[in-house]
Image (tube, rainbow, N blue to C red):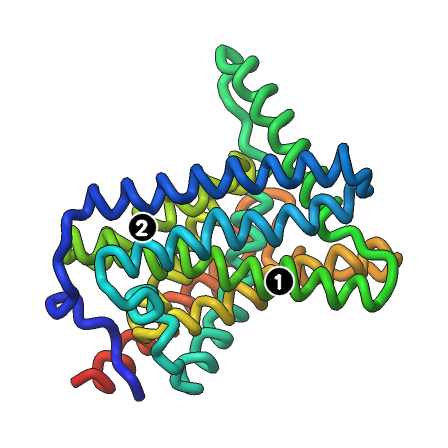
Amino acid sequence: MTGQLNINRLRVFPMWRALLVLFGALLFGLVVSAFCSGWLGSAAGWEAPAVMKTATVMQNALMFMVPALLTGFVFYGKAFRFVGLSKKPPMSAIVWMLVVYVAMTPAMNWLVAWNASVSLPESMAPLEQWLKTQEMAAQEATSQVVDVSSPFDLCLTILLVGILTGLCEETFFRGALQQIFICGTKKGHLAVWISALIFSAMHFQFYGFVPRLVLGAFFGYMYLWSGSLWVPVVGHAINNTAVVVLTWLKEQGAAASIDSVGAAESGVSYAAIASVLATLALMIVFRAYNARGNG
């Protein structure tokens, strides 16, 4: 089995210069994609769902994929190798990732429910109201992106939101950003959590910040310990696809209960506790297995 990344062998380059190029390209992509999306909604007269889906494609490409590959090319010379896309993932790593993902689902559901119920002190009421307004706006945008009216539309949404978004976001946050922090600090754990923190913050959803932080760290460790970016890409794509499918099922009146497994009305459920313990145990085994393969 292909082993984990060898941090000590990674090429060293000025970390802050790389971050400047990466986020500078991201901002440029944001401006271009925002302009194009606005034009499609006004001049072209497209309806909101179509505009949001098209904007998702442009944002994924211009804000995430292009900046990541550009940074890899400028500072490493081989863009796809730098972000980890040139390395074929071992099937055993994919299987392990899926097993861990299933095991952590009850714990993640509990985190989602807990984070959504967080209340700020009364003195911070204006901030809390603003956060809730932003959350509602983000949920409205998400509902437009995953709005489907036919099986074909469902497949198209899975392709754009599930697969493409998973690929582009992982290329940026794990392939480029995490790699930059690893090369700059030589500390894998620090790089994983800083990248996960930025990943969650850039979604601008306070009431989903903690579970998205944990999910980002999970993807980060899958990359760090497998050595192939395709492992977290598959995980991210499956996670996003599950959101799309569950949303569609609920709209069709078919109640999907998988997103409530582990959640409790008060306190912590036994399912969530068992999920945490199982996830930690599987992560330890996953790391040891990859370390042995690297030895």
Q: Nearer the viewer, residue 121 or 12?
A: 12
Q: Earlier in the sequence, mark 2 or mark 1?
A: 1
In the image shown, does 119 or 72 lie closer to the viewer?
Answer: 72
Q: Residue shown at 44%/60% (left/top)? A: 170
| Residue 240 image point, x, y percent | 60, 60
Determine which quarter of the picture holds residue 68: bottom left
Residue 80 coordinates in the image, percent (x, y): 35, 69
- Residue 97, percent across and down? 45, 74
**The N terminus: image quadrant:** bottom left
Q: Secondary structure at mark 1?
A: helix
Mark 2 element type: helix
The residue sitting at 41% across, 62% down in the picture is: 219
What is the distance, in whole Å, between disc 2 and disc 1 at their CAs?
A: 23 Å
Disc 2 or disc 1, which is closer to the eye?
1
Q: Does residue 108 appear to the left or right of 27 in the view shown? A: right
Q: Which quadrant of the structure image shows residue 172?
A: bottom left
Task: Check disc 2 and report the residue beneath it.
Answer: 193
Amino acid type, mark 2: Trp
Residue 53 appears in the rendering: yes
Disc 2 crowd, CA 10 A, few/some/many (<14, 14-19, 20+):
some
| Relative horizontal placement of residue 100, taking residue 35 as reference (left or right) | left
In the image: residue 165, left or right of residue 242 = left
Q: Is residue 114 above or below residue 293?
A: above
Which residue appears at 51% of the width and 23% of the height? 120
For label 1, the residue is 162
Residue 211 visible: no
Q: Amino acid at mark 1?
A: Gly
Q: Position of residue 177 (x, y in %)?
A: 32, 52
Q: Nearer the viewer, residue 107 or 36?
A: 36
Q: Please, is residue 34 above or below residue 125 in the view?
A: below
How dense is the environment of label 1, judged by Cα within 10 Å: few (below 14), some, or many (20 and up)? many
